[in-house]
Amino acid sequence: MLDSRIDELRNFCVKVLSDLISYPTVNPPGESYREISDYFSNILNEIGFKVDVIKVPDSLLNDPKHPRYNVIARMGNGRPVVHFNGHYDVVPAGFGWKTDPFKPFISGGLIYGRGASDMKGGIASIITAAKALADSNARLNGTLELSFTPDEETGGEAGVAYIVEKGIVNPDFAVVAEPSGINNIWIGNKGVAWLLIEVYGKQAHGSTPWRGVNAFEAMVHVADRILRELKPVVERRKSKYDYGDPEGARATIMLGGEVKGGAKVNIVPGYCSFTIDRRVLPEEMSEEAAREIEEFVNNIRIPDVELKVKRISVQDASVVDPELEIVRVAVRSAEDVIGIKPRRTVCMGGLDTRFFQKKGIQAITYGPGVQEVAHMANEYVRIDDVLSMAKIYCRMVSGLMGVELS
């Protein structure tokens, strides 16, 4: 009955996803957050949920000019509480788009637009599943709880971290609808150690470089030392977990995500900086990974150059037992819908799911989308996958709390 109702909701699902893509919720800085929060509130109220929109206190924000809003919706009552989460922020569109990234384009069963896979497609699956349950007058033996949150793309502190750590939500089970792909369940994610390396030299006129100390040349030297000496040591470390790609089982270190410095073509640069993105295996500790880089850089000596290492973010990996009840229910539900058992792997990137897992909540990441197109130009999601995932979510609700259909 629920499957047929979801099939009937195909146009509804496509419209919801198209609407979501149309909100340019670009982060940073955090645009259109209020508008999309109002959209969630209206549509979920219409479906029959009790909705709260929670504004994060300005005192907790780095940029109070761009407020943060968490939307929490509930249906039913009591335990267990089954929670579905999606982040509504997206990365900047960037270049190379064939169509306007914030005007959804539909072709060949695909919807194109920024956030289609990461992760407004997953949000559309959640809302479609919720509407199918509500339209079918489902009696829930527990509480169905939804959250739509900001700032996953910048660490999640004002989003899932805030609502979990403040006790605004405290579910028994949680599903984060990131684009793991319909054939794959992420049981966890790698950790990160993000650092900024700052190089201070002495500015001078470009025609008399001997009067200055070239921070760029010093930065190149530091980067070269890291690449030649530290990177091979780090990337020999391997994990026991399945990452869906053999290369993903390695610890990694990536330089130059952000590079800054220099003022003009004829000025010896007195300052340069670059970032380091270190991905940490579940078998490692992020604190130790960060300290390893700090000690390596601090042991480099360059005459008349000052090196500084600053931490941007340090987060441990988070992985749950692949035999947890929520994982088994997800696998069984997926097999019913798509006819195969999804793989249980670890995500190579970071996920908001870790905030649930660290609180001891049974939590996984499972949502529609194509990992390879996330953050790229011409991002898309398959409409059929969004609908199939809605069917899987309905089965998961039934499997975790029990559902009676009238």
Image (spheres, grey):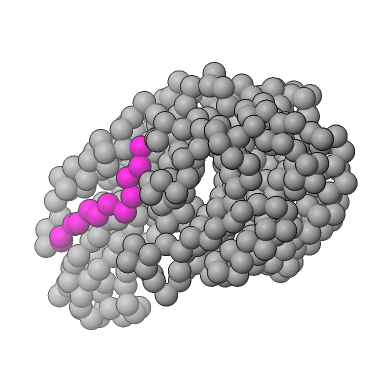
Q: Nearer the viewer, residue 238 or 37?
A: 37
Question: Is residue 309 covered in magenta?
Answer: yes
15 shown above or below 130: below
The image quarter containing residue 334 is top right
Q: Residue at x 25, y 60 (%)?
A: 198
For the stretch drawn in magenta, the main secondary structure is strand
Question: Is residue 165 covered in magenta?
Answer: no
Q: Is residue 99 visible?
A: yes
| Residue extent of the magenta highlight | 305-317
Farthest residue, direction left: 304
Residue 339 lies, in percent from the top left, at 79, 24
Farthest residue, direction top: 323
Q: Residue at x 32, y 45 (%)?
A: 314
The image quarter containing residue 208 is bottom left
Q: Residue at x 63, y 61 (%)?
A: 41
130 shown above or below 90: above
Image check: 251 left or right of 344? left
Q: Is residue 372 visible?
A: no
391 shown above or below 271: above
